[in-house]
Image (cartoon, helix red, strand yellow):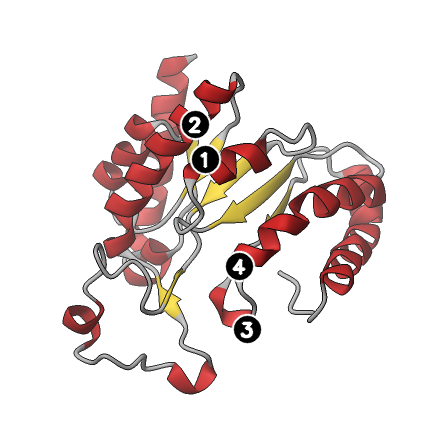
Amino acid sequence: MSAAESAEARVAEIEEMCRRLHPLAANRPSLALQINLSCPNVGLDPTHLLEEATSILSRAAAALVYERPLMLKLNALVPPETAARIASHPLCDAIVCSNTIPWGTMPNRIGWKKIFGSETSPLAKYGGGGLSGAPLLPIVEDWVRGFRSACATEGFVRPIVACGGILSEACADRLLDAGANAVELGSVSILRPWRVQRIVDHVNERARRRV
């Protein structure tokens, strides 16, 4: 994710990154690009970055030259209806949700003080940080359902890669049952790395049964 201060500079940085990926893309047909628009750790307001999504998709696709899947990563603060409007862009191949939830947001669903024992973020001096892990699972589950419904209302379908709080096969099932097409593993690889392969195998087996 670009940390540049202006919209033009951020779009230009992503475009340059894609140009540098160009030689790799030529010989790697499975290469896909996930563009982050929601990291809370770069000092930018992610809600403003959504306005740049169209420019980012267009210039990233042009710079890559070879046609490759382009995915946009959002967090669950983005209303599913807004995400659906972004996903309707013809160059958006999938949506990824959710990135880290910025500190102090969604107080009705995240008990920040209960989790951290303080009203102040332990990463306050770095801008506040955010939350990943198990508390995100029900939030992402609801978001996926909302996004799937919003896309249906708009009359199109877009793949969803869901992530946030997947620590077991049952966690992955919750997101897949909510409407996700795939899952992305993060926290479990740090907290329970011995479970990663088991979850991957389980999700792949579900996919094979659907075919």
Tell me the kind of residue under disc 3: Gly
Q: Quadrant of the C terminus?
A: top left
Residue 5, located in which quarter of the rendered image?
bottom right
Q: Which residue is mark 4?
A: 46
In the rendered structure, the answer to whether residue 123 lies left or right of residue 67 reads left
Between the residue at mark 4 and the residue at mark 3, the CA separation in whole angstroms equals 9 Å
In the rendered structure, the answer to whether residue 59 lies left or right of residue 52 reads right
Point 48% across, 66% down: residue: 40
Q: Are marks 2 and 4 in contact (CB under 8 Å)?
A: no
Q: Which residue is mark 2?
A: 150
The answer to which of marks 3 and 1 sits earlier in the sequence is 3
Q: Which of labels 3 and 1 is toward the front?
A: 1
Q: Secondary structure at mark 4?
A: helix
The correct choice, above or below, for 11 with respect to 203 in the image is below
Q: Which residue is mark 1?
A: 81
Decide: few, some or many residues near mark 4? Use Cα within 10 Å; few <14, some 14-19, many ≥20.
some
Residue 36 in sight here: no
Between the residue at mark 3 and the residue at mark 2, the CA separation in whole angstroms equals 30 Å
Q: Secondary structure at mark 1?
A: helix
Tell me the kind of residue under disc 4: Pro
Residue 148, located in which quarter of the rendered image?
top left
The correct choice, above or below, for 9 with respect to 167 in the image is below
Image location of residue 30, percent across then percent down: 66, 34
